[in-house]
Structure formats: C-alpha cells, structure tokens
Image (tube, rainbow, N blue to C red):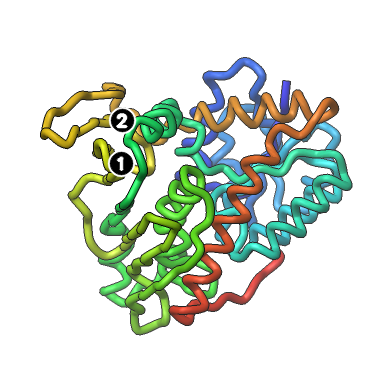
Amino acid sequence: MVRFGIIGTNFISREFVNAGKALPDFRVSAVYSRSLDTARAFAGDSGAVCLTSLDELAGRADVDAVYIASPNAFHAGQAEQMLRAGKHVLLEKPACPDRDTFARLCSLAREQGVVLLEGMRPAFTPGFVALREAVSGLGPVRRVSFLYCQYSSRYDKFKAGIVENAFNPALCNGALMDIGVYCAHALVSLFGPPEGVLAAAHRLENGLDAQGGALCRYPGMLADLSWSKIADGRRANEIQGEEASLLIDSITNPKRIQRVGRDGSRRTLYHDPDPEFFGMTHEIAAFLAFVAAAESGRPWEGHNRVTEQTLSLMDQVRRQTGIDFILRTS
C-alpha cells in the first residue's frame, strides 16, 4: 500500500484520485491546500487529513508519496521539500520549468533513495506502447507531425479581462508548458532529442505564449510540432516513413492508429473504443510499481532521461521565443 499526499486540488487532482481508486495499493491519506475549506471539499468523506502546511505534510509518517499538481511555478520547490523529507514524488507535467531544475531534483531523489517521476500520462497508456511498436514497421522515418491545439475553457474569461492561473505567465504557464509539452515529449520518447530546433510563438498582451510551433531536425528526418490554447486542432497526427505512414488520432492519448501504405491501403493497428480520456490509471500503476522496486533498482530512470531531454528541447524553444519564468517555492 502506498499512501499519498495530494498537493493541488484542481480537476486533474480529482481525476488522479478517481483513477487511483481502481488500484488496490493506492490510498489518499492527506490533502494539502492553502485553504482548509478547499482541502475539506476535495477530501470529502475519504477520511484523508486536510492540511494547510507543507511542513506538516512533509513530516507525516502516514504519507509515503506525494502527488504534486499545483501551478507549474511551485513544482520544483514543493518537490524538493518532499524529497528531502524522504517522500516519493509524482510530479504532474510539466515536471519543472527547465531541464537543469529537474536534473537537480533527480540527483536529490537518488541521494534520498526515493522515486521521482513526471506524470506524463500518455507515455504509460497502451496506445502509446502500440504507437512505439508501429513505428518500426514504416521503413526509414522521414517526417513527423504532432499537433495539440485546444481552445482553453479559460480563454473566454481572459478576453473578458479575468486572468485565471492557466493564463498567468507568472505561474510558468502558457501553451508550450501546458500543451506543447505533450508533442515534445512524444517526439523525444519515440525518436530521441533533435539536433536542431527552429521555434516561433504568438504572445498575448500579458506576455503569455498562447500558441507556438517548432521545426526539429534529425539526421534524415524533420519533425514539426504545433500547439495552441486559443484554437482547436482537427487534423490527425502523422509519422511518415518510406514504406508507410501512421495516422494517430491524438498524441495525448492515442485511441486509434492507422497504417497507410504507399499504395493507399489502410489498416487499423490499434483501436481503443473506451471514451475515457485521461487514462491516468496506467500512470499511477507504473508509479506504484516503481515505488515497490525502489530498493532493488531504479527502473524509472529511463523515463526521467526522456523528461530531461524534453525539457531541454523546450528550453531551446523558450530561448528562441523569449519565454521566461520566475520560480516559486510555495
């Protein structure tokens, strides 16, 4: 049994808790929020203790691991505090605003002998596993096109003069961090880090990057990534090989993968009819398995290397487009 403390009481934390209930070794024992009423409303009748002190959460003996889903700007400081307290940490994506910060946290986790993992949900889904297997049957891959463009439910409020967390650049938010990270992580996970990047972004009047794109260069291959919080994207994701191409319905949770041959023939390689979008149970199950293996090895390190490489790619995009952050601790 792994007893979790929860930092952050937003919708993704609720999805996390609901998904975890399907696993016998999952339990929530504590909920942290700056507001006690908010923590109590989130905890409901679960029996979890409600806290407004991170120090108290870090010191609780009945908390083995902490799931951190606070605004991006607070991830690094909160993760460091929990790691130093000997807690395993699952960090909601993006794990950190930059590669160097995440690398320091990884070193600290090794010193403490605990698990640190980015909660990059798609990487643990059966659809992504099927996608990785399908790539090998395309011949040399020449072009990749990954897209995640989703009109934010908070954009209308922004246009009305109400700036919520998702559109506040001071919290390390923005289209790259919240949306583009999925495209970047999928690319790096499948093909490794690129050898060159050319990026562009559109900024709102408060400086937040609302949409962007990057052209990534590999030996013999190009990859274009597109992301947006202010418009919906409808086209499929595509991986083009010399022998065939793959059409993927969603890079955030692949549910349908089709192989299109050079002769135009189509074959469905993977289809998951389950309409459930988040699929967080797979991510939690992987984390629980890593915690169980913490004393016998570090099988999660491969995932952390991909996270570091993804953050390095995003660092390059940020430098080229002028996106900067101020990190916070609480």
Above or below, comparing residue 54 to residue 163 in the picture: above
Asked which quadrant contains residue 223, the reply is bottom left
Q: Secondary structure at mark 1?
A: loop
Above or below, comparing residue 62 to residue 179 in the picture: above
Residue 74: in sight, yes or no?
yes
Q: Secondary structure at mark 2?
A: loop
Label placed on residue 255:
2
Image position of 105 (left or right of 266): right
Q: How many marks?
A: 2
**Which residue is more in the foreground, 137 or 228?**
137
Label placed on residue 174:
none
Q: Residue furthest toward the right?
A: 111
At a point 44% along the width and 50% down the height, the residue shown is: 187
Above or below, comparing residue 87 to residue 215 in the picture: above
**Which residue is more in the foreground, 198 or 156?**
198
Label placed on residue 250:
1
Kind of residue at badge 2: Lys
Image position of 124 (left or right of 68): left
Q: Residue furthest toward the left?
A: 264
At a point 12% along the width and 33% down the height, the residue shown is: 263
At a point 27% along the width and 74% down the height, the residue shown is: 160
Image position of 224 (left or right of 326): left
State if disc 1 and disc 2 touch (CB < 8 Å). Answer: yes
Label 1: few (<14), some (14–19) or many (≥20) C-alpha neighbours in 10 Å: many
Q: Residue 137, image x and y in percent?
A: 35, 30
